[in-house]
Each structure stands twice: as C-alpha cells, then as structure tokens.
Amino acid sequence: MKKALIIGAAGFVGSYLIRQLLGDGYQVTATKMPQEAIPGEGFEVRDLDILDQPAIAALLGEVRPDCIFHLAAQSSVYLSWKNPGLTIDVNIKGSVNLMDAVRSLDYKPRVLLIGSSEEYGHIAPGETKIAETSAVHPGNIYAATKVCQNLIGRIYVDAYGMEMMSVRAFNHIGPNQSPMFVVADFCKQAAEIEKGLKEPVIRVGNLSAYRDFTDVRDIVRAYRMLMEKGAPGETYNVGSGHAVQIREILDQILVLSKTRISVEVDPQKFRPVDVPIVEADTRKLRECTGWERRIPLKQTLQETLDYWRAQTAGRDGGFVVSE
C-alpha cells in the first residue's frame, strides 16, 4: 500500500484529497496546524508548522511517505493584499522548508507542489486559452509567491534530481468552501436570504470577469493522477478548459434559489487588480494522465447551495422574503 502525506490538509481541498486517496487505496497521513481540525477517520492526523523545517524533516523521517501533496498555503488573494508578509512566509519559506527536508532523505518520494492560475496574471484576449508555456505576469502578492514556488521547485529538480512536479490549479469550487471565494459567497448569501437571515440582496464585486471553474472533486482526482504519472520538473494546468462569466454563475444561483433576490454592487468586494479572463489549456494534463472533467458546473452549484442551506438550518431570521 502506497503511503501519502498531505501537507496542510485542514483546508477546503485537503478533506476532498484525503477521501480521494483513501478511496484509491492509499495509506494517508494528513498534517494541520494545532488550532485546526480535520474531521473523518481512516487516516492519521499530525500537527505541523511548515515554517519549522526540523519538524518537517522529523515527520518525513518517521512517516517515510511514497508521495507528498503540498497543499499548505495562504491561498486568499484578498488576504495577500492585507498581509503580504504572512503570504510570503507561508508560501515561499514554507515550501523551501519542505523541499530541503525532502532532499535530505535517503530516498526520493514524489512531490506535488500546488500552484495557481493566478500566476499567469494579465492575459491578452488573444492569448487564451492559457498553456503552461504562457508567460507569467503575477498581478497580486499571492500569485507572485506561487510563481516563486514554481521556479524554486524546478531549480531543486534540476540541482538535486528530485521527483517533484507542479500544478497551476484554476478556480475550484464545491461544498464546504470558505465564503471568501466567490461561488461559496454567493451560495451562502442566497441560503441566508432564503432563511430570512438577511435582507433579500446579494452583494457582489466584479461580475464581468471570466473564470475557469472546476468541481474540487475533479481537481483532486487530477492531483492523484499527476502524482502517479506526471514528469519531474514539469508544470500542469488543472481546470475545466472553459471560462464562465461570474455574472452567469450568479444568474444560475439565482435560478436555483427559492426566493426573489436582487443584486447590489459592493465596492469592498473588488480586488485592487483583477484579470478579465482566465481559461485553462488542459491538453498537457489530459495527454499525460487521461483526466477529464466529470462533474458539471450546474451540479456543483446546486450541491454548494444545498450545503449552505444545511448550514443555516435551525437558524431563524427576521427578514421576510418573497417566494
């Protein structure tokens, strides 16, 4: 049985990756910060701070994983503007700590570094779809740290012969995602309106942008397939390959809602810098692994809205909404 180590598994993607790997027959160890929790059973949970390099080395020496999924990150673009120092520490220093711990081992586990489509930054309309060979122009602090992680990862592969690949993950969505992200935000607001917990108005930021949305369950399946088949030193886009306007996402959620909801623009939800369109060219991923998207967008939106409906169950509000 192969042993998998997931670094930073307490977040949105981690819980889904744990389930994916357990279902595929892996023995899983998942790490978290002491104040975090990872629900579920059938896997081992360990506390780990990725800024503590000796602790990483000790854990690797004890677990001796066959493969390592590096999910630990400060992944909010919004928070990266508010706290760039934290983002740099976690996303760059933490990644280098892991790489150094891995290269000090007496064997070579495979490692998957998780990057982001944000690395590509401002793409001219004629340059989409975005391939892995496209130039990177990071437009925010989070994206810049992920570009740095990718570059350092390739240097370590070349210098030390490490079995390490990188992904650039495009927007992934699904139940249990933080409302810091747009689809979860819209669904949470809609569910609260249905329960009368807030006035029947969804507050939004930029609706004109196009993003490449993929169900998180399809994303983690791609991660597992790349871990098994990806080539060291290579970077792979992971996404649906089809961009959808944020306005269309909102419209679909409004159709799924049980109440009448109006829309109001909130300037606080706009980013200092935003990219008009982001769409993945996923040919490299598909040719390497045979991966294909399985879960349609409408299903993901319905399940995410139902998740937030469940979260609001039992709560009573004072707003009267129209059916």
Image (cartoon, helix red, strand yellow):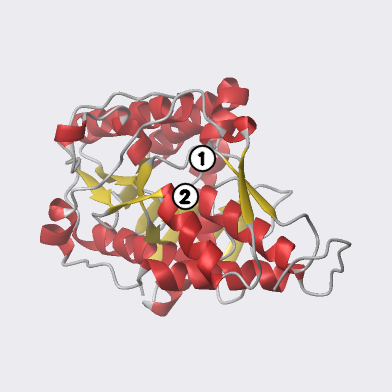
The amino acid at mark 2 is Leu
Q: Is residue 321 above or below residue 172?
A: below
| Mark 1 or mark 2: whose residue is earlier in sequence | 2
Q: Position of residue 121 (x, y in %)?
A: 32, 29
Q: Position of residue 257 (x, y in %)?
A: 59, 69
Q: Give the position of the N terminus as an image quadrant.
A: bottom left
Residues 178 and 192: in front is: 192
Q: CA distance from mark 1 to mark 2?
A: 24 Å
Q: Position of residue 17 (x, y in %)?
A: 45, 64
Q: Position of residue 2 (x, y in %)?
A: 35, 69
- Image-quadrant location for residue 203: top right
Residue that mark 1 sits on? 75
Most distant residue in the left direction: 287
- The crowding category of the residue bearing disc 2, from other C-alpha atoms within 10 Å (few below 14, some 14 to 19, many at least 20), is some
Horizontal side, residue 285 vs residue 309: left or right: left
Q: Is residue 215 above or below residue 233?
A: below
Horizontal side, residue 103 vs residue 172: left or right: left
Residues 238 and 78: in front is: 78
Q: Is residue 47 visible?
A: no
- Whether label 1 touches label 2, CB < 8 Å: no
Residue under the point 56% across and 24% down: 81
Residue under the point 14% across and 52% down: 284
The amino acid at mark 1 is Ser
Residue under the point 18% across and 48% down: 281
Q: Is residue 298 above or below residue 279?
A: below
